[in-house]
Image: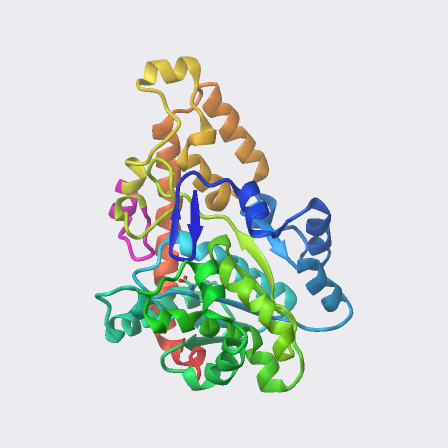
Amino acid sequence: MVVTPWEVSGAIDYEKLIQQFGTQPLTQELLERIKKHTGKLHIQLRRRLFFSHRDLDWILDQYEAGQRFVLYTGRGPSGPVHIGHLVPWIFTKHLQDKFNAKLYFQMTDDEKFLIHPEFTLEKTAGFTYENTLDLIAVGLDPEKTKVISDVKDIKLLYEIAIKAAKHVTFSTVKAVFGFEDSSNIGIIFFPAIQAAPCFIESALTGENVPCLIPAAIDQDPYWRVTRDVAPKIGYYKPAQIHCKFLPGLGKGGKMSASMPETCIFTVDTPEQAEKKIWNAFTGGKPTVKEQKKTGGTPSVCTIYQYFYYLFEEDDKEMVEIDKRCKTGDIICGDCKELLAERVKRFLKEHQRKREKAKDTIDKFFIK
Ligand code: TRP
């Protein structure tokens, strides 16, 4: 398995990642503690889509002692948004609501420009705008959310970034990110830019404000470097809560825009989404007859995972689906039909909010 900020491939063993990256598992005890503040646990916690963390217990200590914290997450605007991208954003909105937290959201239009040889700045600026519509559609609070474009808002980031950069050597980023002598110098400096939003609230207010980052586990290398630097420049280490990758609709692998056939984009038409779902990889048998007799295998089925992680909140229903699949009572066509209905309903609603976001987008960008 390979898990870096720019590549995720192979069969991902999340337990092993916790060990390799040196993070902490999200324990039942910690979940109980979160529950005290949020009420019923969010589906992404109940189903362990978020599975690992750093210093989340410390963030809760601080919060319980009356100290507010800020949220920080982001997006590399390199293409259209798919529903896998929405996963941590939906969870971030939940945290924003429950903890009344301000959110800094970074659009790394510089990073994507630097790593894709053919990208222009106009292109990443266009995706920044389009992707921000998706972000707003998730329902974030315009009063408490700031979207940062690295290119446009560099003034806000630069002081913090160079303070951080001064404490990070080339050999460190080479080891952590795999940079080489042939890497361009823009991307070598970039980790300092991704570190900066962790400390914006503190820098702007002069008060040391803890920061919690909800993000997929592939971003962890950035936080390892940032956490080393933080105390050296007078700030708290940022805490993290890490999620898994939403699988694509094909056999194995995460949902990835580079494989559009296995990927549900937020701007897909109902027909496009439906077609992709009908072509999805499932745990079915070669023939209906065989499947009715011996049942299917939910544990390898992408459709099942979509119900589990996003589209079936009811825990009892989930058990039913599992049971009825294994006994051959329902077959793949039944599940595909039901999922397609739900996905189409979701997309319709998301697209409506996305259109509406055009009226409020200016509120989210930094003036
Ligand atoms: N580097 C991330 C990407 O390519 C974007 C990003 C910037 C980010 N800051 C973040 C993601 C903070 C999660 C949390 O997608």
**x 44%, y 60%: residue:** 177
Q: Answer with left or right where residue 181 lies relative to residue 243.
A: left
Q: Which of the two residues, 46 or 176, is positioned nearer the viewer here?
A: 176
**x 68%, y 73%: residue:** 68
Write down the region rendered in magenta: 263-275
Q: Answer with left or right where residue 153 lies relative to residue 227.
A: left
Q: Is residue 240 shown to the viewer in this render? A: yes
Q: Quadrant of ligand 1?
A: bottom left
Q: Position of residue 139 (x, y in %)?
A: 48, 65
Q: Position of residue 292 (x, y in %)?
A: 39, 16
Quadrant of res 262:
top left
Q: Position of residue 104 (x, y in %)?
A: 51, 73
Q: From what the image shows, is residue 218 above or below residue 173?
A: above
Q: Residue furthest left?
A: 118
Quadrant of res 108:
bottom left
Q: Which of the two residues, 211 or 330, is positioned nearer the viewer here?
A: 211
Q: From what the image shows, is residue 289 above or below residue 267?
A: above
Colour scheme of the picture: rainbow
